[in-house]
Amino acid sequence: MATTKRDVDLSRRRLLAASGAGAAAGLAGWSPAGLAQAATAKPLPPFAAFKDANRMIVHSASGIETKREAFGTSGITDTDILFVRNNLGAPDASIVANPDAWQVEFDGVAKPGKLSVAELKGMGLASVATVLQCSGNGRGFFGHKASGSQWKVGAAGNTLWSGVPVKAVVAALGGLRPDIRYMTSTGGETIPAGVDPKTVVVERSVPWTAMEEAILAWELNGEPIPLAHGGPLRLIVPGYYGVNNIKYVKRVAFTPTETAANIQSSGYRVRPIGQKGAPAQPSMWEMNLKSFVTHPAGNAPLRAGPTQVYGVAFTGGSPVSAVEVSIDGGKTWRAARLIGPDMGRHAWRNFVLPVSLAAGSYEITSRAIALDGEVQPELRVENERAYAHNGWRDHAVKVTVS
Amino acid sequence: MATTKRDVDLSRRRLLAASGAGAAAGLAGWSPAGLAQAATAKPLPPFAAFKDANRMIVHSASGIETKREAFGTSGITDTDILFVRNNLGAPDASIVANPDAWQVEFDGVAKPGKLSVAELKGMGLASVATVLQCSGNGRGFFGHKASGSQWKVGAAGNTLWSGVPVKAVVAALGGLRPDIRYMTSTGGETIPAGVDPKTVVVERSVPWTAMEEAILAWELNGEPIPLAHGGPLRLIVPGYYGVNNIKYVKRVAFTPTETAANIQSSGYRVRPIGQKGAPAQPSMWEMNLKSFVTHPAGNAPLRAGPTQVYGVAFTGGSPVSAVEVSIDGGKTWRAARLIGPDMGRHAWRNFVLPVSLAAGSYEITSRAIALDGEVQPELRVENERAYAHNGWRDHAVKVTVS
């Protein structure tokens, strides 16, 4: 079983982290003591110990980012380098030992009740490619020190998920009850003792129409979903920000109103800097139009001559139809070429532009264009929690060519 | 670097193999002594030690198959479970330590010469999904004990590759010389001492028109190609049997005739049982139309009730347009549904058919139908080397439902 393998992986990856980032830090594992010893990089936490430490940036035990230069050009982001972001600690690893036994409660349907993953596997099968992206991806480019992981570009990845279509389950349960407006799903994280569940529970409402494309997934990139990514079962809402893709999902309810859980009512709301979150503010649902360059990554000087500028473009809205690249900080733009398989409108697409660079300094960036004519904007929208950054200027890389 | 990681992986995977297949065998590594101790499964050879031992069948140190039940439904075959087949031992692992330094010689072009991977990376970029399949996949179903690994279904996988289009390199080298009919490529394996190179060298000719879609790839599934799969550089000829996808490629020559190397002139030729290979016989080039069921896998009894029958369909020819499934050994057929992203005509596609099975015995199989009307045949074509098996009858799984 992949899950078992990933768990066993722990000691090996620590060893790798050690060789990559200083032996003392790696072998000490995840502890304040270990951190204190690590002059360079933080070690991977145990539940994500299977990640490739050399290609990740560890912000915290619950915030791990893919390095810009680690994204390849093959379309899919390998699970070994996919970012991790948890709002609460993961449940015990024992839940992925027997995925088929995991149970989910369904409500807001004609015949509410519980179903096991084994039962869900008999009810339908779909497979979808979608970008998974943290709402705060790009927070590290904001200037107002918003709290949370200071992600640059790597709290995103393109992933393949397989599972049962939510609408197949709803049909099997007799259809939706009247007056439904939201699909409200609850994660299986353990609520810390002494805490009001409402303040921390990972429970999100999305428009019920998102049910059309949503799946309850047990497979990520061809393997059982590891604990770090929400196994044994995760709700996947293609095109929606990461937080809506509920890990260890234990309840899916169709509801007339949004949940009152803090993570929905005040969390993940876009509002001016300094304001508190509130239900009237926009919620982090569909992802906006975005692209970024992954090569050059700005981490090393280039030699003069021909090079391929490439990166990724994606959206939760009108499909990406074109990408433009600038090597002069946005003064001029040239059309890039989209390459590789088109995996559907919620997947990302690699783009490439061949350039020949003479010695000098360059500011290289990209902007995506959607089928409906929308163009990825230049600037971020300032907001308290530093969400939804898709401005191409901040995402530019500075490159020295000699 | 992924390559370094995979090399370091060795000791960890041995440990895993040990827990999966008996500690003595695993820890002893790849040796006759280790084999003798392993009552159950053979251990993974060092160069493929990063594979997930529990989901592989090790036929030999150079023949490792994916178990039928290990294929997921997400489209891509993870590198951790992708089959391995080598005609000669792999070169020393040091060649993947610095992939950019690897050099390839080009001939049959206006300006012949050598290029490094670093130079190739500046010349173009493409990404393609293709099935990689050993010519002998399905050999284990033949009755005449053909020599070679007795593969069932798992010497195949769907993979993403990135690299430079061969035609971009040819253009940069001034175009092809006159009278070219073949693209002839040579692998970088070390020829054993005292052996006539012609008898063992991995050198294959394919029609020069295959250049149109071929790439020189440095990336597999989003990561640098590991040694076991032909890193640092592999020729990928989409839709062609595995042997044509030259590993550690060190020479690409455009030639008026096919190479005289045995692997081309007499090897990989389809001929009647008992005959020797010869140049006039069909060569193993484009893959034929094929599908097989991966669930149920026939490895465990099923409980009565609803289940999803699923599998994969692919071809090197006219694209797959439909798949039919039979649960009664081919007496009756029902149309399956294609699911997941369509990654292009050389990729495989998952199909699914929901069925409800009462207690009893079933023989479950599938047949693919191509856009040009071709239907996957019932029977294998008997041939000396047991190549190109795409008969649906042998690929059926027998399932007991109770």
Image: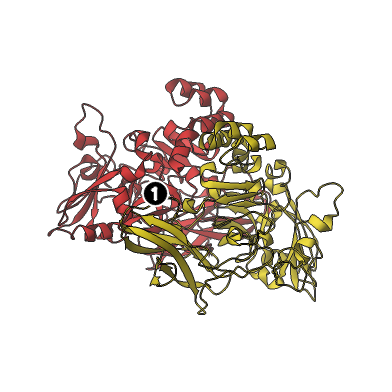
Chain colours: A yellow, B red
Height in image: B184 above or below A336? above
Q: For label 1, count other residues whose C-alpha is less than 10 Å away and answer few (under 14), some (14-19) or many (20+).
A: many
- Give left or right: position of A157 versus B178: right
Q: Residue at x 73, y 49 (%)?
A: A102
User: Residue A384: horizontal and vertical position, in percent?
Assistant: 69, 65
User: Residue A336: horizontal and vertical position, in percent?
Assistant: 39, 68
Residue B276 seen: no
Total numbered labels: 1
Residue A383 seen: yes
Which residue is at the front of the view, B267 or A395? A395
User: Residue B15: horizontal and vertical position, in percent?
Assistant: 55, 29
Q: Name the residue carrying label 1.
A: B133
Image quadrant occupied by the N terminus of chain B: top left
Which residue is at the front of the view, B368 or B6? B6
Quick one: which residue is furthest to the top in this view? B33
- Give left or right: position of B6 versus B279: right
Amino acid type, label 1: Gln
Quick one: which residue is furthest to the bottom in this view? A373
Height in image: A371 above or below B49? below
Question: Hey, which quadrant is residue B265 in on the image?
Answer: top left
Give the secondary structure at mark 1.
strand
Q: Residue at x 70, y 42 (%)?
A: A93
Chain of the residue where label 1 is placed in the rendered structure:
B
- Give left or right: position of A37 versus A300: right
User: Residue B170: horizontal and vertical position, in percent?
Assistant: 23, 58
Which residue is at the front of the view, B204 or A77? A77
